[in-house]
Image (cartoon, grey):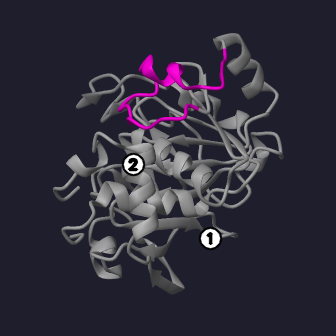
Amino acid sequence: MPDASYTWAEMMAISISHEMADGDFGSVGAASHIPAAGLRLAQLTHAPNLSFFCGGSGAMNPRIQRLTESSADYRNLVTSEYQFSLDDVVDFETAIRFDFAFLGGMQIDKHGNLNMAVIGPWAKPKVRGPGTIGLIFLGGFRTSYIYTEHHTPKIFVDKVDFVSGAGWLDGGDSRRKVFRPESDGPRRVFTPLGVFDFEPESKRMRLIKVHPWSSVEEVKAATGFELLVAADVRTVDPPTEQELHLLRTQVDRDGVLRRHAATA
C-alpha cells in the first residue's frame, strides 16, 4: 500500500504523466479523471504543448483545478481552450489525427484487447456492459493507453469474451492485417499495481514497472494469464514534493484522487 502521504490514484496519475510527450494530441474517455489528472500534470511539468480532448464534454485542454470524475461534466468547458463538436471528433478519428487515446474495459486480455459489451456467452451473458461505445474507434488513433482502477484476474483475462476495442488482436502482425499501418495498438497499461508495455514481437503484455507498494509476484498473482516480465523491472519512484504540490493545488484541489485510499 502507498504510505500515508499519497494514494494509489495519485501515483497512477503521476505514472501516466511521466509517459506523456510534449506536442502530442490525444483524447480521454468518460470515466477518466485519473488520466485527465496525469495529462494536466504533464502540461504543468515537462510537456506544456501536450493537448488533450475530453470526449464527453467536447472540452479541449481544460485548465482544471477541481478535477471532475467524468469527462462529460460541463465544468470541463468552463476553463477549456476550445469546444469540439461530435462531428469534429469523428472526423479526427477517421483521419487518424489523434496521437493517442486513454481507454479501459471490463476485461483486458494479454494482447490489450478491451471488452465493454458482455462477460459470458453472448446469448446469455453474466454481465452486460454499456457496449462498444468509443472503443470501436481504436483504429483511428495512432496509439492508445489502457488504464484500470482495479487489477484482478477477472479483469486481466487470457482472452476477452468480446472484442469491443481492438488492441494487438491475436498478437504478432495480426493487427497490421486489419488496420491502417499508421494506427498502432496499445503502448502502455496503467493499473494500481504497475505499468506495462507489449513485447515487440509477440505483442503480449509485459510488466516493466511496479509501484512502490507492489512486487512482481503480487502483479503476477493478480493477473489471469501468464504475464511476461521485463528483465529490468524497476520500482517507480514515489511522488516528489513538487508533483504532489502541483497535483493538489493546480489539478485536484478537491482531493478526488485522495479519496482513493483503499486497495484497488
- Indicate which disc, 2 or 1, sits on the residue closer to the N terminus: 1
Amino acid type, residue under disc 2 in the picture: Thr
Amino acid type, residue under disc 1 in the picture: Glu
> Looking at this view, is 230 or 23 the one in front?
23
> Looking at this view, is 213 or 60 the one in front?
60
Residue 158 shows in this picture = no
| Picture residue at 59% right of the left edge, 25% below the top | 80
| Picture residue at 21% right of the left edge, 70% below the top | 1
Residue 12 x/y as whole percent:
40, 58
Question: What number is the disc on residue 199?
Answer: 1
Residue 175 shows in this picture = yes
> Looking at this view, is 247 or 111 the one in front?
247
Tag 2's secondary structure? helix
Tag 1's secondary structure? loop
Q: Residues within 10 Å of mark 1 (few under 14, many from 20)?
A: some
Q: Is residue 238 above or below residue 141?
A: below
- Quarter of the figure with residue 172: bottom right
Report the span colored magenta: 62-84
| Picture residue at 51% right of the left edge, 57% below the top | 16
- Quarter of the figure with residue 3: bottom left
Residue 238 x/y as whole percent:
38, 74
Question: What number is the disc on residue 221?
Answer: none
Disc nearest the viewer among 2 and 1 = 2
Residue at the spot of label 2:
249
Q: Residues within 10 Å of mark 2 (few under 14, many from 20)?
A: few
* 218 lies left or right of 55: left
Examine the structure image and report whether residue 74 is included in the region drawn in magenta: yes
Q: Is residue 130 above or below residue 19?
A: above
* 240 lies left or right of 212: right
Examine the structure image and report whether residue 83 is included in the region drawn in magenta: yes
Image quadrant for the C terminus?
Answer: bottom left
Residue 236 x/y as whole percent:
44, 76
